[in-house]
């Protein structure tokens, strides 16, 4: 039985601590490129107080959200979660972001994706995990593919930045595919 | 953008007649009657709709 549910090669999944983490999330919110990558909502810097209030709210019973912390320095670098889309369908949506730029493109996100997939398939008993990502976010798409996600289609013209339309790519991984990937 | 269940071909045909285009499918996203089914994504852009209306 695999008991190392929360730690991978580079990162571990931890509880989000509103007290110490809000300041850091607020700092990420001042990075407009970060906004462009994670959300179609208009970029808007947030105060630590607003983030803290948000983090202190009662968590949704279908959301499983974690802080991503590095194993080496125990540094809070991002967040990852699964949101179950009706338990009856054994299906959930994945969301992840690495807010600390120093940790972009170095395998930290990939490690966190592998951990959350293991959590979803073993702990939550899922059969499928879905996600959608901006087609321009090549770094994220590559990380999802490394973890075993397959491109399933694209929703055209979902987002408009600087007068230009962008597509969303949607991806998915089935439990059988994940099992093959895990044994490889 | 709309989602339609794989087991509802009547709806899919009707969306196609209205100009919706198949954009992809979320494989095995649903449990129904002991098996898994795909969720089909369709979309229509304003230009496509304007072209179709003439």
Image (spheres, rainbow, N blue to C red):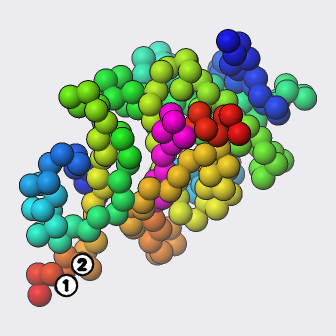
Majority secondary structure in the magenta region? strand
Give the image location of residue A42, x and y in percent: 49, 54
Q: Secondary structure at mark 2?
A: helix
In the image: residue A45, left or right of residue A165: right
Residue at screen point 23% across, 48% down: B6
- Taking the magenta stretch, the answer to whether it contains residue A166 is no
Question: Which residue is the site of mark 1?
Answer: B51
Residue B48 quadrant: bottom left
Q: Is residue A155 above or below residue B31?
A: below
Residue at screen point 19% across, 76% down: B49
CB contact under 8 Å: marks 2 and 1: yes
Q: Nearer the viewer, residue A153 or A78?
A: A153
State the separation of the CA atoms marked 2 and 1: 5 Å
Residue at screen point 45% across, 65% down: A167
Q: Nearer the viewer, residue A140 or A89?
A: A89
Assign the N terminus of chain A to one quadrant of the image: top right
Give the image location of residue A92, x and y in percent: 44, 32
Give the image location of residue A87, x and y in percent: 35, 22
Q: Is residue A11 visible?
A: yes
In the image: residue A20, left or right of residue B25: right
Residue at screen point 66% across, 56% down: A142
Q: Write down the chain letter for disc 2.
A: B
């Amino acid at each position: 039985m695999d008991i190392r549910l929360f730690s991978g090669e580079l990162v571990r999944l931890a509880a989000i601590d509103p007290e110490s983490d809000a300041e850091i999330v607020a700092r990420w919110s001042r990075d407009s490129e970060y906004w462009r990558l994670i959300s179609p909502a208009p970029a808007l810097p947030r105060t630590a107080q607003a983030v803290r209030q948000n983090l202190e709210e009662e968590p949704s019973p279908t959301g499983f959200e974690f802080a991503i912390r590095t194993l080496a320095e125990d540094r809070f670098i991002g967040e990852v979660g699964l949101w179950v889309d009706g338990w009856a369908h054994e299906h959930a949506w994945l969301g992840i972001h690495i807010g600390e730029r120093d940790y972009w493109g170095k395998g930290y996100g990939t490690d966190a994706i592998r951990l959350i997939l293991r959590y979803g398939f073993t702990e939550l008993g899922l059969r499928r995990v879905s996600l959608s990502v901006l087609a321009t976010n090549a770094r994220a798409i590559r990380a999802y593919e490394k973890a075993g996600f397959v491109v399933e289609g694209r929703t055209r013209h979902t987002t408009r930045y600087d007068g230009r339309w962008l597509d969303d790519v949607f991806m998915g991984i089935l439990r059988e595919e994940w099992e093959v990937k895990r044994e490889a | 953008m709309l989602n339609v269940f794989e087991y509802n071909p009547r709806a899919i045909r009707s969306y196609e007649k209205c100009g919706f285009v198949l954009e992809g499918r979320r494989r095995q996203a649903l449990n129904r009657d002991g098996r898994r089914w795909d969720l089909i994504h369709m979309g229509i852009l304003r230009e496509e709709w304007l072209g179709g209306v003439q």
